[in-house]
Structure formats: C-alpha cells, structure tokens
Amino acid sequence: MRVTGLRTAVVQVPLPRPIPSARLVIRTAGCVLVTLETDAGPVGEGLCFSLNGRRLDVLLAMVRSFEPLVVGADPCGDAFLRQAEAELMFFGHRGISAIGLAPIDMALWDLRGKAAGLNVARMLGSAAVGVPAYASGGLRLSASVDALQAEAAAVLARGYRAVKMSLGKPDPAEDAARVRAVREAVGPDVMLMADANQQLTVEGAIRLGGMVEEFRLAWLEEPLPYRDHAGEAAVAAALRTPVASGETEYADGMEDMLRQRSADILMPDLQRMAGPTGLMRVARLAQAQGVPVSLHLFTEMSLGLAAALPNAFVLEDMPWFRPLYREQIELDKEGRAVVPDRPGWGFTFDPAAIARFAA
C-alpha cells in the first residue's frame, strides 16, 4: 500500500452550547480534516483544530506542507515521520509544527489498522472491550448550583459513571460548595473530577484542594498555568487529591513534567503530541514511572489508543467532534466506552456533515 493523495477540508463545528472559559467564550471547533488516499483503496483519516477556528489558514498551510513527503509513503513504515521530524527541526517540534503533523500521523495509524483488518486497539494487542469514560464539556462555571445538580443527574441518566465539572469562582468557598452539590447529586460511587483551567496560584490550589478533599475528587485538573511545572509539582506534593495536567503541553514538556513529578495523572493531547506516535511514546514513559494517563479530547481516536495502554486511567468523552462522524461512541452498562470492532479508528467522517459545516 502506498499513499497516493492528501485531501483536506476545513469545517467549523458549532459546540452544543457556548462554553465560557477563563480566557474566551468557545463557540466552535474549527477543524482541518485530513484524508490520505492509497493505491489499495482504503483511506486514512485524522484532524486538527483550533478554538473558534482562529488561524485555521495557518493550520491548513502547515498540514499541506507535508504533502510532498507523505505522497508515495508506505503507511506501515516510519520513513515519512522520520523525514517530517527532521524537516521540522528548524521550526521546533511544538506549536504549529506538532499540530500540523498530528492529523497526518492519525491518518497513517488509521491506514495501518485497515491494512491489518483490525481496530487500532486490536492492532496494538489489546483485548479490552471497553474503556472507562467520563462526560466532559458540561457542568460549567456559568451554571447555578441547581442547574449543576440537574445536569449531573442527566449525565448519569445517559449511562456515565464519571463526570467532570469546572472550578474557578473568585471565592474558593463557593467552588467548594459547588463540588459538594455535585457530589450530593451523583452519589458516593460516581467518579467526579474538577478542572481549574489554569486559573489558580500554588497557594490557592493547595487551599482549595484541602477544602474539597472530603468530596473525594478523582483529580484536580490544571490548577496552574501549564508551563509552571515546578508549581504544579508543589501542589501535587501538598495534596492528597491527585493532580491531573498536561493537556496543553507538548511532548518535551510532558517529559519535563515526569521528571519534576508535576502531575499524578498525565493528560496527553493527540494534536499536541504530534499524533498517536508521540502520544504512545509519552504514555509509555509515564507507564515506566508508574504514572497513569487520561487521554485528552479526540475521543473517537483516543479510545483505541487508551484501550491498549495499561496505564490508561479514564477516557475523556468530549462531544465536540461527534457531529463529524458516521459512527458514534457507545457506552456499556458499566459506563465504559465500547471499543469498536471496525478496522482502523472504527470511526469515519460523514461527507454530509463535512458539507454542512464547510468553512
């Protein structure tokens, strides 16, 4: 099998509802969709994105810059990736370099699974039929306490056994009261996470962590600005509640986080890891140090990878990209995301959706 062409499409996918974050209101996921065509028939798919579609033209240009390298490549070999990484040395392997490379690496992994006639999870040797998953993207700061409780109950009614909420009120006592309310709504046995979205200081994170300890959070996520590895290490060392972080970091930064013990749980992101190859490399480094991982976003592709990682803790089920796919994530009776038996990622772009969301 050889790659014969690289097709791209640019789309703007509206979020189910706008998300007011610490820095901006997120209304859409602007995506560059990549399809690699082959002389054997199967196609491989991947994507990268930006919030609200900002600088999508830059992303598209970076993705297309790899066309001369990937056309003619053997999807099951590593020559393309070695060449691409060598060419990127001048720019570095962070930022637009990593994000632009990611969807092509995703598509190559999709092709490898299809060439083998196996889902990526099976290709990697996993026999897992499901991966614990948590509902993400809801329970925001803008919701009242009553709305938080109602939404948490609705999440459980959809079959989830784990859910994440946002923190970041000016008064930590208000944050603690909101955590209490959600814990009361979901009961003692549901996994509950809380995301501070990089808004706290070391002292504030330690204080808030102590105030919510009784509610048995599965983790406190991104308490500090993502580059403050030493600060997060101080928070992680001070709290009994695990600290989860890393979704905004790149591969070399994740390695530094492991060295400094900045997080009890690492959260590698497929596009910031420059694709599945980099993500699996970081996840295995974490495994060697006894650190669990929770893969960030890209649920349709992260699922197969998480199924194959012995240190995968729980998978983020974020609905942002769901409208782009023909197939949908399914949950079993235990709230696990079902690993599909379809080859490759097991999820394929819907041409009608691409046309509907075309930017």
Image (cartoon, rainbow, N blue to C red):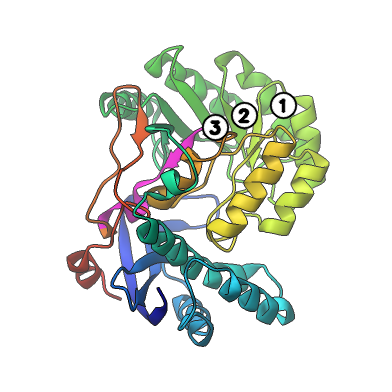
Sequence-first tag of 1 and 3: 1
User: Could you give the CA–CA distance between mark 1 and mark 3, rounded to whole angstroms?
Assistant: 26 Å
For the residue carrying disc 3, how many other residues have a C-alpha within 10 Å: few (<14), some (14-19), or many (20+)? some
Q: Is residue 236 visible to the viewer in this orientation of the structure?
A: yes
Q: Nearer the viewer, mark 1 or mark 3?
A: 3
Q: Is residue 317 above or below residue 61?
A: above
On the image, numbered disc 3 is attached to which residue?
313
On the image, numbered disc 1 is attached to which residue?
207
Which numbered disc covers residue 329? none
For the residue carrying disc 2, how many other residues have a C-alpha within 10 Å: few (<14), some (14-19), or many (20+)? some
- Point out residue 27 in the picture as x, y percentages from the top left corner: 37, 59
> Does the CB distance between marks 1 and 3 fall below 8 Å?
no
- Point out residue 150 in the picture as x, y percentages from the top left corner: 30, 25
Side of 170 relative to 113 (left or right): right
Q: Is residue 261 above or below residue 117?
A: above
Residue bounds of the magenta highlight: 314-323
The magenta stretch spans residue 149:
no
Q: Identify the image quadrant of residue 259.
A: top right
Q: Secondary structure at mark 3?
A: loop
> Does the CB distance between marks 1 and 2 fall below 8 Å?
yes
Please tell me which residue lies in front, 332 or 358. Answer: 332
Q: Secondary structure at mark 2?
A: helix
Sequence-first tag of 1 and 2: 2
User: Could you give the CA–CA distance between mark 3 and mark 2, rounded to whole angstroms?
Assistant: 28 Å
The magenta stretch spans residue 321:
yes
Residue drawn at (75%, 36%) of the image: 289
Furthest-left residue in this view: 352
Q: Identify the image quadrant of residue 130.
A: top left
User: Given the image, on which type of amino acid does mark 1 rest?
Assistant: Arg
On the image, numbered disc 2 is attached to which residue?
172
